[in-house]
Image (cartoon, rainbow, N blue to C red):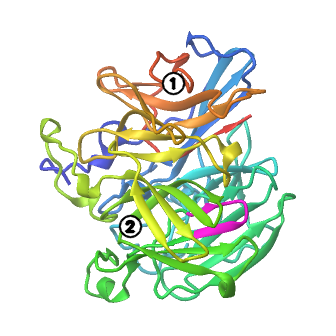
Amino acid sequence: MTATGINPYLAGNFAPIRSEITVEDLPVLGELPADLNGMFVRNGPNPQFPPLGCYHWFDGDGMLHGVQIQNGKASYRNRYIRTMGYNAEQESGRALWGGMLEPTPPNNPYGPVKNVANTALVWHRDRLLATWEGGAPHAVTVPELDTIGPHTYQGKLTSAFTAHPKVDPVTGEMLFFGYSLFQPPYLKYSVVSPEGELVRTVPIDLPVGVMMHDFAITEHYTIFLDLPMEFRAERMQEGQPPLVFRRDRPSRFGILPRHGDNGSIRWFEAPSCYIFHTLNAYESGDEVILLACRMSEVDVLGAADSPMHDESDLSQDDSGAPFLYRWRFNLKTGDVHEEKVSELPGEFPRINEQYTGRPNRYGYLAKSAQGSMPRFDGFIKYDFTTGATRVHEFGRGRYGGEGVFVPRPNATAEDDGWLMTYVHDQTTDTSELVMINAQDFAGEPVARIPLPQRVPYGFHGIWVP
């Protein structure tokens, strides 16, 4: 909490909005590409009722904000994801679940955990899924953004479903995992066929339950991150947060053939760290190369409940800041090499997803702003061939989020396309969709679309062509 007692994740542009609206024919500043047709959709937390006790940013009900671009025109709509938990609370008129910082009241008839479906989105087999790593994804219609319901692959989904599944752009397969904190198997790994059928789930042995937010794939391998953010039941029994980051334990990276199992996984050790998001991975000779945003330490449960500084006194603490790193795992010798790619802190890494699992020349990060809150004041573009780094600034008092790469139709170059994100202007308390030419990175936006209502900061987005 702040000194004034206001939870920072319920204030400013982190605060939720209440209205669900649809507005056609939005104004456009600049010009939308004539051949660009599709929908930009972003997921994020938006609690519909005052929380029970302490609130963490990860707790809010999922809300989708979408801008449809068609024939040079744009429209906006936002919709809650109608999960079981959302509907139950809507009917009761109040919050029924606690969150990451607050235990759920005992004997909740709806269960101890609410699937908020608030984290990310994936498009596979002509289906849009809203994801949350603790439960099943929810299918959503496009462009209406109406909730169809939980998608369990005809009941074959028996584990949680990561917020960040990977779709292979060549084979059409989708790979995902689900982790458990409470009992083994602590990890299950699944393969969905190009036709959308869940064809395989195998358990993977871990020594203890860990918070595993993301993973990566290459053409032939899947990479799991067994990082020292551990679940400890004894801490919960003592009234402490059950997740604890253990600086004394090394990080482990598990590499297994895509269709392998626990018997074929190989584990590599590296210095202790935490990774929320991977950028990409690929193979080069005997090596598997991973690019990801590395933090030397992290306090997942403490951020929303810790003292906040005055805005004028905010500083960037490098010890907990995310930086882009590269790991090289030699499958022949077992050697591991870890190196820092950039001194600019940033998160929410994205690429042109046509290069998922293959060598990519370019990567994009949201550039971390000074301060203790997760805000981003621009984009960073990395050229991994030349080593060049370019920055796009949103402007004074303007903060955005993840930059989703949208390839130009019939593009011939990896970076021929645009980055899209929602940007909030603190001085006017307004939001807009901003579109950056990835090949003119520091230049003015190609187009800005002022939105009819404020869009709170959120998590991950997608472009549905």
Question: Front-most of 260 and 150?
Answer: 260
Residue for point 47% across, 15% down: 444
Residue for point 67% across, 57% down: 166
- Residue 353 visible in rendering: yes
318 left or right of 423? left
Q: Amino acid at mark 2?
A: Met
Q: Amino acid at mark 1?
A: Val
Residue for point 53% across, 24% down: 436
Q: Which residues are magenta?
A: 215-223
Name the residue carrying label 1: 434
Question: Front-most of 139 and 108?
Answer: 139
Q: Is residue 161 above or below residue 416?
A: below
Would you say residue 340 sits in the magenta stretch?
Answer: no
Would you say residue 220 sits in the magenta stretch?
Answer: yes
Q: How many marks?
A: 2
Secondary element at image label 2:
loop
The reply to whether the C-beta atoms of the residues labelled 1 and 2 are less than 8 Å apart is no
Residue for point 33% across, 58% down: 55
Give the class, few, some or many, for how many residues have Cα within 10 Å of label 1's Cα (few <14, many ≥20): many
Quarter of the image holding residue 230? bottom left
Q: Nearer the viewer, mark 1 or mark 2?
A: 1
The residue most toward the right is 195
Name the residue carrying label 2: 100
Q: Is residue 186 above or below residue 141?
A: below
- Indicate the position of residue 130 as horizontal and vertical percent values: 63, 53
